[in-house]
Image (spheres, grey):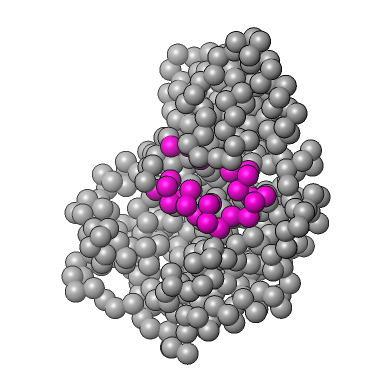
Amino acid sequence: MNPQTPLPIPPNVSWIDKLASFYKENSIHHNVYDSIHLLPRYVRVVGQSCYFLNQDPPSKKPNPLPHTPSPPQSPSQIESLSALLESEIGSTVTPSHLIHGLLRISDPNAKINNCNLYKTGKIVGLDLSSALAAITLEVTPNDHVLDLCCAPGGKLLLIADILGSFGLPSNNSYGTITGVDISEQRLSTCRSILKKSSTPSAKIRARLYVGDGSKFDIQPPPDSWWDYSYHKDIQFAYKNNKTNIDKSNIPWFSSKLLRSPALYQESIASQSNTNVLSNNTKIISNTTQHPETPCDNINQHRKLYDKVLVDAECTHDGSLVHLYKYVNNSAIGKLDTDFLSPERVEAVSNLQYSLLINGWNQLKVGGTLVYSTCSLSYKQNEMIVAKFLQFANNFTNSDHYTAIVEQPNFVNSQPLTIDKASIDNHSQNSNNSEIIHIQNSSNHQPKETKKRKHVGLKTQELILDQIYIDFKEHLNKISSIVNCVRLDPRVSDTSGMFISKIKKLR
């Protein structure tokens, strides 16, 4: 067995100095990069019904695939796969202690491309942090899920596998996953992963679009998309009524059932109840049209998604292995001089906010949106979510807020909110690594300073100092922001990641 080998320091270390300066400017400890040699690799067993090990596994499949062997599910079978992979790559492999179906490889330099499990599509690379973001959606059998920044496809495949674990599509299991990415080249990678690794009941539910996630507004498919008799009916209606079909709505890649042009007739719609937000206007109701909003085509008959994932483009400063490969692989290219510049951070932050707003507009009432980045910069994380919460809740009173951040399902404690009475004293506290002045939201009684408990996972506290200052007059609207989670490479045994689970209340 080869010992864990640290990643070598690149010959040109100027980018490390630049990264350290970036961390300092964003209230991040400068030694974050030092943990790169401690980080493991992770792979996921394809076809697994992934779930948190501190929770009960999903219910039994309502409509299992006929004549198809079930993928390994028991701990002993997972351990057997771990042992097989370990023998192939020569590095210690153990099942994740947090997520069923995820395997931890101790050596960050371990190569899986040449092992049989990878070649045959039985495993795919997926970091623990990415898996956490996807599973936080808590996908159920009838959920139509939208992944607005889906490439290269690891999280999309995981969501497809979760939906596929419920068996063939039926009245009890008609959920789909729609992936969007602006890069056709990156989306091709996503397509390849689906073709190679997904199970039949997962692959049939996926559709991919090349497009700008900040403007994407194609509806989810009808709930009966899987029913051949339904296709016959709408095909007959199409031929007789000559309804228009916008071919741009047809997926770039999907199963034949989800590519049927008749599914994308203009007359196919279902009623929804939503509020539309934009950067140019405050809040638009279903019955109000506004010339400035990019969503002015949304109307009261529009079908929306049950779950939305916005794993937004970012500066990738928390993904240390990603950064290292980026600056040391000549095929990818070196860091340019503007990679971590304030101008780039501002441009990326604007894009992130636009993605979040559009994801919210595509989400139905009662649905869940997960906003995540692999940056450690509060400007791309806490600041974006605070800005969104203030905007979304700006026109409602405290009893009728539109958006609230919920604790991810891997957090084991009572939901928290900001204790407004103590904010004025916050500047006197010098320990910036703690979340202070929080209270239990279930009874609104002030609590002592506390840290949240995470089952089997260590996290870093949020960076809220500047948020307290910038949003002091709106703390009631953004108080649930303390339920966001930061994964830190130094303590979380995975890459840096920010995760925010936002519920659409009305």
**Residue at left 55%, top 40%?**
254
**Residue at left 58%, top 80%?**
84
Q: Position of residue 139 (x, y in %)?
A: 67, 48
Q: Residue farthest to the top?
A: 241
Of residue 124 and residue 136, the one placed in the foreground of this image is 124
Q: Say if residue 187 shows up in the picture.
A: yes
Q: Is residue 300 left or right of residue 375?
A: right
Up-down relation of residue 398 to residue 64 (above or below): above
Of residue 412 and residue 409, the one placed in the foreground of this image is 409
Magenta stretch holds residue 205: yes
**Residue at left 59%, top 12%?**
243
Magenta stretch holds residue 197: yes
Q: Say if residue 470 shows up in the picture.
A: no
Of residue 127 and residue 200, the one placed in the foreground of this image is 200
Overall secondary structure of the magenta section: helix
Residue 470: quarter of image = top left
Q: Position of residue 451 (x, y in %)?
A: 60, 65
Q: Is residue 379 left or right of residue 297?
A: left
Q: Position of residue 407 (x, y in %)?
A: 64, 53
Q: Position of residue 350 (x, y in %)?
A: 37, 38
Q: Which region is colored magenta?
A: 186-210
**Residue at left 43%, top 88%?**
3
